[in-house]
Image (tube, rainbow, N blue to C red):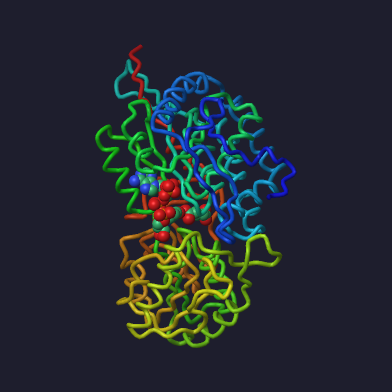
Amino acid sequence: MLQLSRPDLLVTQAYANGLWLDGTARIAVHNPATGALVAEVADCTVEEVNHAIDAAAIAQRDWAARTGKERAALLRAWHDLMIAHADDLAMILTAEMGKPLAEAKGEVLYGASFIEWFAEEAKRVYGDTIPGHQRDKRILVLKQPVGVVGAITPWNFPNAMITRKAAPALAAGCTMVVRPASETPLSALAMARLAEEAGIPPGVFSVLPSSDAAATGQAFCAHPKMRKISFTGSTRVGKILMQQGAAQLKKLSLELGGNAPFIVFDDADLDAAVEGAIVSKFRNAGQTCVCTNRIYVHNGVYEDFVERLSAAVAKLPVGDGFAAGTAIGPLISDAAVNKVRAHIDDALAKGARIALGGAAHALGGTFFEPTVIAEATSQMAVARDETFGPLAAVFRFDSEDEVLEAANASEFGLASYVYTNTLSRVWRMMEGLDYGMVGVNTGLISTEVAPFGGVKESGQGREGSKYGIEDYLEIKYCCLSI
Ligand SMILES: NC(=O)C1=CN([C@@H]2O[C@H](COP(=O)(O)OP(=O)(O)OC[C@H]3O[C@@H](n4cnc5c(N)ncnc54)[C@H](OP(=O)(O)O)[C@@H]3O)[C@@H](O)[C@H]2O)C=CC1
Ligand SMILES: O=C(O)CCCC(=O)O
């Protein structure tokens, strides 16, 4: 049993149009570290989802009519409650998802930072005036909310992937219906409780867990009042939503898979590069779309880097997210473990060698040893497909042109990282990498103040920053004849 200061934050009912729903069936939520049952939450039907969308459409009229400042005040109150209850929210997050408690608290603060940021942006949704094209014409550009937005979110960031969508949507005057991942509905429901407490009106922010993701996705795409869908998850599901949404030309924001290259040149500070590689690879046990997947190291420093990386990774404690000092928690599922294992087996069969780890962890369950493999090549599955687990694959390269070509040889284009101390090379890499985000001499690029998002099959749209609210606004052009 979780020892929460506010036990009522462990919510098992769905929240729609300001009402708490029991549902007729339940979804069991298990702690991936122990397999223990954490809670059973309401499993919503398509009918309930459709009602929630109808209610969100009604609520949206009044919500959009409020001033930005009024919406900002309510968002600020929601943010403050999340901060006040960050410890409870972190415990709920660790219990349902497994990440270490300190990392969970970090996610809660990160999640709240989007609400704070967009509460501020709510007051700054500016339109435009354009010099008329004829003497009697005046041109105005209005920015208006898109309308009702549906969010479908993943299990790897059960808090922040919701706030990163809900905060700009609500700030812009949209209302939102959230369908959280079935593994991790509890963080979403706890946030709904706090949104209600903050005074966010009924219908503005609803959370409906469901065991049938495909049915909810179809309902979102088919409902004529649903104006936009914002999705974070796999490229496979992103494509399904795009196909389904095509019938009504639904607007889509898609934050999908990655295959991040992490490039270390021979002039880099190797200790800093190792530190950056650890953060970007092993954060959330490697289960992050911006996690490094391919580490490219210049031949001149290759052995040295592999040795230093392995030594540092060997020090990462693996364990239950609630145990003090844990750096790497369990993976989310057996399927996730199998993918890591398959990538290692494939690499070994094609000539890679294990520098560290390589096997299921002695703790059993879905714990896996943080692993480093050397002599990775472009022929291996790990070069093409994101592992989404604690496997660092280290590739060799000789020249800047060669590594840029290898790094860009992917259908994905989310995050990329470069370590070098040559200024002109920094510019060439920033401009040449075909990615939505580039970290230079850093492995941690996520922040609410910057635009997060990808190119190619990593998705479309940007979350966070001044750009993030634009995805929830329509441009209306008004031509005045005077
Ligand atoms: N960009 C990112 O942050 C993420 C990337 N991934 C990538 O995807 C891989 C698979 O992870 P997985 O969790 O299965 O990702 P999915 O894309 O399957 O799941 C993400 C969300 O989409 C829901 N979903 C699943 N199928 C549909 C559908 N047909 N229509 C609408 N929604 C749907 C899921 O529901 P439910 O929980 O019920 O399955 C979940 O809420 C990972 O290994 C990783 O490579 C995964 C998660 C996040
Ligand atoms: O989509 C994800 O995997 C979450 C990214 C977390 C972050 O903002 O860094």
The single residue placed furthest to the left in the displayed view is 247
Quadrant showing the C terminus: top left
Compare residues 98 and 432 and report the one nearer the observer: 98
Q: How many marks?
A: 0
Q: Is residue 164 left or right of residue 231?
A: right
Q: Is residue 304 left or right of residue 224?
A: right
Q: At x 49% / y 84%, what residue is drawn? A: 355
Q: Measured from the top left, where is residue 121 in percent x and y?
A: 56, 36
Task: Answer above or below: position of 81 versus 111.
Answer: above
Snapshot quadrant of residue 274 = bottom right
Q: Measured from the top left, where is residue 478 in percent x and y?
A: 36, 21
Q: Is residue 155 left or right of residue 219?
A: right
Residue 221 appears in the rendering: yes
Q: At x 46% / y 46%, what residue is drawn? A: 153
Residue 254 appears in the rendering: no
Compare residues 421 and 289 and report the one nearer the observer: 289
Q: Measured from the top left, where is residue 463 in percent x and y?
A: 47, 45
Q: Measured from the top left, where is residue 56 in percent x and y?
A: 46, 25
The single residue placed furthest to the front in the displayed view is 24
The single residue placed furthest to the right in the displayed view is 5
